[in-house]
Image: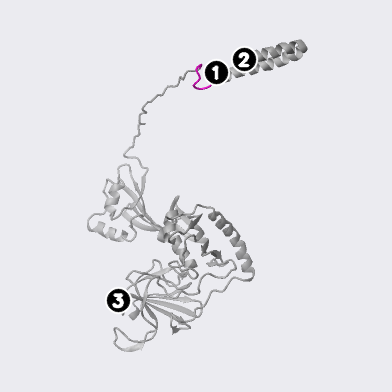
Amino acid sequence: MLREKTAILAHLKKLRADDPARMRRLGAVALVAALGMATAVAVVPGSAEQPDLSEKVVEALGELPVEIRQDDARPFIREDRLRGSESLASLLRRMGVSDTEGLPKGKALDALQRTLNPIMRPGCMVTVATTAAGRLVSVSFVHGKNDHQVLLRQTAEGLRLEELALTLDSRVQMQGGSIESSLFATMDAIGLPDSVGEELARMFGDEIDFNTDLRKGDHFNVVYEVLYHAGRPVRTGRILSAEFYNKGVRHAAYLYTHPDGKAEYYDEQGKSRQEGFLRSPLEFSRVTSGFAMRLHPIQGIWKQHQGVDFGAPTGTAVKATAHGEVEFVGWQNGYGNFVVLRHGDKYTTAYGHLSGFAPRLKKGSSVNQGDVIGYVGTTGWATGPHLHYEFRINGVHQNPLTVGLPSVRPISGAALAQFRQQTTELKQQLAWAAGTSSARLD
């Protein structure tokens, strides 16, 4: 510091002799610079000239007084997920219902519990509203599979049970993954729901055997919907687009919505990725009786079996083999619980011996290929749990396993131009999905 000041003063002395006016201007600048230099040195933390004057102060803060009046009319809301083997009574106790006045007891509680059992599954989102005194106002159960909530609420006449449609918001998510062992192991590692993996397997299952064809390094990108209710994710929606690289070959699918609102998957050339009809209404089953003459197991006579029987455990989901409309749903003699679907003018399919029907399935309902319409059972003339499946053309029974199935026509003409325009954004989203982190399984 002293050497720098001495150099500045010597330079000023020389300038004074050469140009007094210039010396005065530069002298002012030099003085400011010297002072600034001294100031900068003076505030350097930890220097010998400036001791550390900081002090650590710890002080406990008291709780703010909160007064809850027992006559407060505003509801107190608690949310949580239903735990395993939790009953309605134990759930309400855990969620702060301490005043049991107005709640059913004994046989009435047992009857209410039986009504709620189908939806009270572990993981189901539960919202409980109570008064300040702990009396139940309402409890709702949200189960995303049927897009409804069941609401149990207090009224002047007592508890009332209602089923309400959920208001769902759709958000688009994108993700990419790389296969190291199996598709579903990758799904778990990158946090994708199994439902997305199942849909990918269905979309590309005609070209890729996901049990034997997958190789290390195969990868995929997927753009899909997540449906939210009240800001919380309820379930996954549709896959909007996907691509799967298997053994170096790219397979792609894009969801295209027709002007009539019907949505289907197509490849980039506009060819449908969907068969007109599925061969089997069950994902996993075995044929126990074919389309042939047989000795009827109950009637004891030889007669033509006009369908195919698929053996499967009771309760196995039965799916519509094609888009169609419900022509009949109900009980029909030896068929037991029976569903008939009409697919256009020529084709009908039939499903017999069901243990039950899908919720809200009724005559005139529209169904999509793959929708669950019922469940395997033993109703009617059945000696064991199985599905009786029939395929008819103009009312004439055909062998479902060998009949030539109609295919879905490709997109053409003006619709093809609209399809390409609609898929432009989906292709861009797939490119973004490719930039996400891929899962590597060791």
Numbered tag placed on residue 3 in the rendering: 2
The reply to whether callout 3 and callout 1 are in contact (CB within 8 Å) is no
Q: Which residue is mark 3?
A: 384
- Magenta stretch: give its range: 44-49
Dot 3 or dot 1: first in sequence order is 1
Say which label, 3 or 2, has the lower sequence index.
2
Mark 3: amino acid: Gly
Q: Nearer the viewer, mark 2 or mark 1?
A: 2
Magenta stretch: includes residue 45: yes
From the viewer's perspective, tell me whether residue 284 is left or right of residue 24: left
Residue 385 location (% of width, % of height):
31, 74
When asked about the image quadrant of residue 87, the answer is bottom left
Give the Cα separation between the discs numbered 3 and 1: 94 Å
First along the sequence among labels 2 and 1: 2
Q: CA distance from mark 2 to mark 1?
A: 17 Å
Dot label at residue 42: 1
SS at mark 2 in the image? helix
In this figure, what is the number of numbered marks?
3
Q: Mark 2 and 1 residues: CB-CB less than 8 Å, in contact?
A: no
Left or right of residue 182: residue 115: left
